[in-house]
Image (cartoon, rainbow, N blue to C red):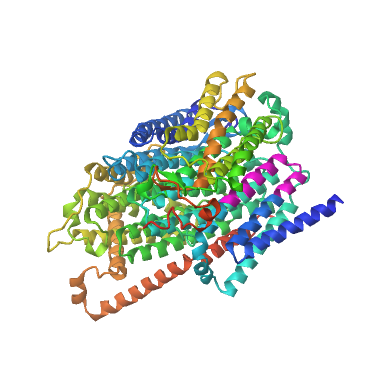
């Protein structure tokens, strides 16, 4: 495979990166109502480019390469699109278009106003986030990737405080400061690597890197920095207030897309730049952090009173899921991280999370807009008033749970196979448990929205049909992802959703989730059932609530500045140490 | 002799860094930081990195210092509250220990870097002729790694959009910052009349010299932006309306021309951001010329901050520039709920 000469389809890569930025600049120039129009011209163009890249990649059957300015690395910069990059490019393009259609209702310029702050900023920043993500996916150079991180952070932060309240401003500042700490650590690592190996080009670096102190320090620092930007537990200081407080259309961008950028960079570093430097204990640490994120994020999500915060905490848990593949992809005989089923599973997880979580935030935003609040205990009657929205929310939840034929199902299957293959049975428990937790908060919301309401539900605003369908399309997309992914993957991976085994798993997961929701939810889920069940269950509920409260306290403690900043450096040190353990002599 | 000077400068730098971190008063910390930036640029001169030295002095010391001073003025009221949130002695001791150990590992890594260090400098020098410019830094920034430079300009534009997005809705389309009014016979007004012509000449010289000698658009843009700020602070001109057409055009012209030249390269030289034979230097000059207004405007507007008054607000009489900067309550985000 030739990685240092341009391929035919590579010519599409630079436009894919620059097109959104050109859209942003043109929107800034034209201003006013034109901002949104420009965005809607560039969205289909960008989607077409992503499809074009996918077709070119399938046809050429190899990594697409483009040398910018004709300068070959190490002097110049190459853009490269391998399988993971192509998958993410396509997914992000689809999600951006969906969010764009949804956001028309929220971020239109009001009549009689020449230009409004929120609309102007939103559409320009949406384009900027898109361009930055595309750069993260196709860049083949560690410094260009740093620039991409900067672009992503500066485009993401203002999205948090578009609503303009003091609280969201604080959340945005928190996000920016912590993300910049992450950037600095990444840059430190990149500088060390250049100092040690004289190149920043990924394949050249991968050839040159040895498991030695420079590479280990660089990997530890960069990983810790990127985890801070991805908000993996315990570095999620900024995530709940930022994702819970931003307008729904912005939360969808932040939660579905922005965090995937830094996550993808961790994948690049571990799998493509320094697979040989990675050791099993360090990969296990990533998985352990992921497992902790799943447990704590899910429990705290179940304890939330507001729907948007529930979705925000569920994002925290889903981020954890994205890191389970690292220990599973470790090949103990070769002492290296392997491209393979586990990586494919992780990527599928990311894509299905991007689509489903965008749909969930959009549905939560619609419910908030229609009711004027999003208190979970007060959602009775919503299913009747907003059936499409509720359907979108539930389908997205089911997709995340990993029911056939969702992308998350296939991802779980691939990861379970990898866990079996490598004898790491403990990850099987985490993988199945995660699905139960997801079922928990889907059931919690579902029971509340399905509840009959004694008085008529007062809707403060009519929601846009188009927005509802945008959410539904993304949710359905996530649910059917496994079918789309079957093109490149073997067919036996998807089984009949009505087969006994699958049905039994689904029912078990749902029942487990219902029990969790019953025990942990803040408002008693089923008032009637509880009084009938007697004292024994009352005691169980007390215990569950005590656990839930304890987790909430832990979460609050972890999200304080002193703890978070110390955790950041401690993690860097821990990764550094674990990269030494079990390293080949 | 030079060794002693180096040692003194290095110790001074460390001391200043420590001072900046432990200073109790935010203003003192910023003052320490500005001096630290200036000293650091001396170190870069000593290491023969004149371009880096110029950038460090202009951006690291100057521009960042000015931004931080503005922030300090706005934060004055909250300093006591922030101080009361300080963590306990144990936490701080642990944080210090952790930071010192990470720094030690970093230092050890730097000591184990291979000798001679692997570098791309010879390769860059070898290929410099193809770009037509004499300054290898300019060659790297505008030929070999042109994409990074283009995207850094885009980062600045995004940062500006982010700062603007903090404006209260009613002031959207208005002007940023307070309207300065200085004593027309005062020293500030005098300086604002005398300095800009000199500053503009120096700025443009740095810009032009950047092709073959240390200097370039970034350093030049900082000086030009400073001159503009000086004129604004003396009340001789007002900050622009953020919805003005010429302003928006000036902000986007740099990256857009950069992309256009890149596309021209794809058509004429066979690669995006490539230059056809013999045309490299003129095209680089076109890009730099287009980037200059973008950089000047964005840097100055970042200092100006978010729109904080409607477009036709009258000048506030008797308000002098310095007191206006430091004592005005936060106009951007803090007063808005």
Question: Which quarter of the figure has residue A381?
Answer: bottom left
Q: Residue furthest toward the bottom?
A: A535
- List x then y, in percent, for residue A86: 45, 37
Q: Residue furthest right?
A: B1
Between A325 and A46, the one lying in front of the other is: A46
Of residues A35 and A379, the one drawn nearer to the viewer in this rendering: A35
Answer whether residue B259 is visible to the viewer in this image.
yes
The magenta stretch is B40-66
Relative height, residue A493 to residue A65 (above, below): below
On whether residue B176 falls in the magenta region, the answer is no
- At 35% from the left and 50% from the top, the residue drawn is A357
Q: Main secondary structure of the magenta part?
A: helix
Q: Is residue A72 visible?
A: no
Q: Nearer the viewer, residue B332 or A581?
A: B332
> Is A140 left, or right, of A115 in this rendering?
right
| In the displayed structure image, the side of residue A244 where residue B152 appears, left or right | right
């Amino acid at each position: 495979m030739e990685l240092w000469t341009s391929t035919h389809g590579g010519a599409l890569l630079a436009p894919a990166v620059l097109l959104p930025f050109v859209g942003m600049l043109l929107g800034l120039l034209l201003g006013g109502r034109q901002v949104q129009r420009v965005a809607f011209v560039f969205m289909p163009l960008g989607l077409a480019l992503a499809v074009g890249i996918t077709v070119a990649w399938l046809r050429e059957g190899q990594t697409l390469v483009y040398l910018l300015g004709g300068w070959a690395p190490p002097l110049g910069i190459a853009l490269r699109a391998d399988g993971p990059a192509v998958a993410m490019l396509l997914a992000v393009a689809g999600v951006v278009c969906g969010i764009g259609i949804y956001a028309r209702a929220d971020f239109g310029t009001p009549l009689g106003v020449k230009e409004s702050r929120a609309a102007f900023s939103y559409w320009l920043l949406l384009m900027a986030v898109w361009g930055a993500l595309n750069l993260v996916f196709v860049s083949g150079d560690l410094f260009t990737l740093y620039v991409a991180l900067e672009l992503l952070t500066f485009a993401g932060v203002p999205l948090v405080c578009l609503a303009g309240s003091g609280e969201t401003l604080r959340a945005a500042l928190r996000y920016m400061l912590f993300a910049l700490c992450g950037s600095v650590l990444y840059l430190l690592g990149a500088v060390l690597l250049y100092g040690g190996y004289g190149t920043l080009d990924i394949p050249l670096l991968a050839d040159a890197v040895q498991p030695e102190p420079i590479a280990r320090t660089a990997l530890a620092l960069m990983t810790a920095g990127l985890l801070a930007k991805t908000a993996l537990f315990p570095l999620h200081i900024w995530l709940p207030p930022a994702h819970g407080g931003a307008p729904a259309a912005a939360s969808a961008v932040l939660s579905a897309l922005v965090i995937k950028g830094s996550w993808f960079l961790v994948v690049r570093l571990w799998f493509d730049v320094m697979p040989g430097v990675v050791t099993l204990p360090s990969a296990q640490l990533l998985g352990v952090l992921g497992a902790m994120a799943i447990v704590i994020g899910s429990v705290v999500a179940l304890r939330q009173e507001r729907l948007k915060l529930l979705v925000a905490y569920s994002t925290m848990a889903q981020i954890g899921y994205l890191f389970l593949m690292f220990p599973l992809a470790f090949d103990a005989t070769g002492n290296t991280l392997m491209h393979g089923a586990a990586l494919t599973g992780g990527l599928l997880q990311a894509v299905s999370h991007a689509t489903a979580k965008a749909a969930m935030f959009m549905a939560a935003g619609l419910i908030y807009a229609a009711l004027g609040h999003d208190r979970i205990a007060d959602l009775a009657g919503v299913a009747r008033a907003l059936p499409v929205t509720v359907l979108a929310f539930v389908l997205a939840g089911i997709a995340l749970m990993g029911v056939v034929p969702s992308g998350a199902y296939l991802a779980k299957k691939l990861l379970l196979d990898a866990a079996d293959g490598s004898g790491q049975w403990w990850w099987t428990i985490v993988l199945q448990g995660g699905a139960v937790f997801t079922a928990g908060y889907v059931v919690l919301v579902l029971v509340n929205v399905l509840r009959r309401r004694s008085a008529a539900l007062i809707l403060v605003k009519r929601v846009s049909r188009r927005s509802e369908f945008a959410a539904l399309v993304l949710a359905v997309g996530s649910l059917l992802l496994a079918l789309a992914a079957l093109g490149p993957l073997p067919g036996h991976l998807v089984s009949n959703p009505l087969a006994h085994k699958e049905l039994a798993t689904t029912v078990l997961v749902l029942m487990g989730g219902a029990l969790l929701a019953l025990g942990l939810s803040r408002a008693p889920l089923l008032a009637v059932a509880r009084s009938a069940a007697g004292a024994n269950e009352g005691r169980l509920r007390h215990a569950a609530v005590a656990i839930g409260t304890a987790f909430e306290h832990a979460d609050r403690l972890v999200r304080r500045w002193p703890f978070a900043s110390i955790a950041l450096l401690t993690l860097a040190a821990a990764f550094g140490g674990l990269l030494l353990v079990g390293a080949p002599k | 002799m030079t060794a002693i000077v180096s040692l003194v400068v290095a110790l001074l730098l460390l001391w200043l860094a420590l001072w900046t971190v432990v200073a109790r008063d935010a203003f003192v910390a910023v003052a320490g930081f500005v001096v630290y930036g200036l000293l650091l640029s001396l170190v870069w001169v000593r290491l023969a990195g004149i371009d880096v030295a110029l950038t460090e002095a202009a951006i690291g010391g100057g521009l960042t210092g000015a931004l931080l001073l503005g922030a300090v003025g706005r934060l004055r009221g909250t300093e006591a509250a922030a101080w009361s949130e300080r963590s306990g002695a144990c936490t701080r001791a642990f944080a210090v220990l952790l930071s010192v150990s990470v720094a030690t590992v970093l230092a050890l890594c730097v000591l184990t870097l291979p000798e001679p260090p692997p570098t791309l400098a010879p390769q860059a020098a070898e290929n410099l002729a193809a770009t037509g410019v004499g300054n290898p830094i300019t060659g790297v920034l505008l030929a070999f790694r042109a994409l990074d430079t283009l995207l850094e300009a885009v980062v600045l534009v995004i940062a500006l959009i982010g700062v603007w997005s903090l404006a209260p809705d009613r002031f959207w389309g208005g002007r940023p910052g307070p309207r300065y009014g200085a004593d027309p016979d005062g020293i500030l007004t005098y300086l604002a009349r005398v300095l800009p012509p000199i500053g503009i000449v120096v700025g443009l010289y740095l810009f032009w010299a950047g092709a073959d000698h240390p200097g370039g658009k970034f350093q030049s843009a900082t000086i030009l932006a400073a001159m503009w700020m000086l004129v604004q602070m003396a009340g001789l001109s007002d900050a622009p309306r953020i919805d003005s057409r010429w302003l928006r055009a000036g902000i986007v012209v740099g990256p857009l021309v950069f992309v256009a030249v890149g596309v021209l390269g794809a058509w004429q030289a066979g690669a995006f951001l490539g230059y056809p034979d013999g045309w490299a230097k003129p095209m680089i000059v076109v890009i730099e010329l287009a980037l200059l207004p973008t950089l000047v405007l964005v840097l100055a507007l970042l200092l100006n901050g978010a729109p904080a008054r409607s477009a036709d607000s009258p000048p506030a009489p008797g308000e002098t520039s310095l007191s206006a900067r430091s004592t005005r309550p936060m106009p951007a985000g803090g007063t808005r709920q």
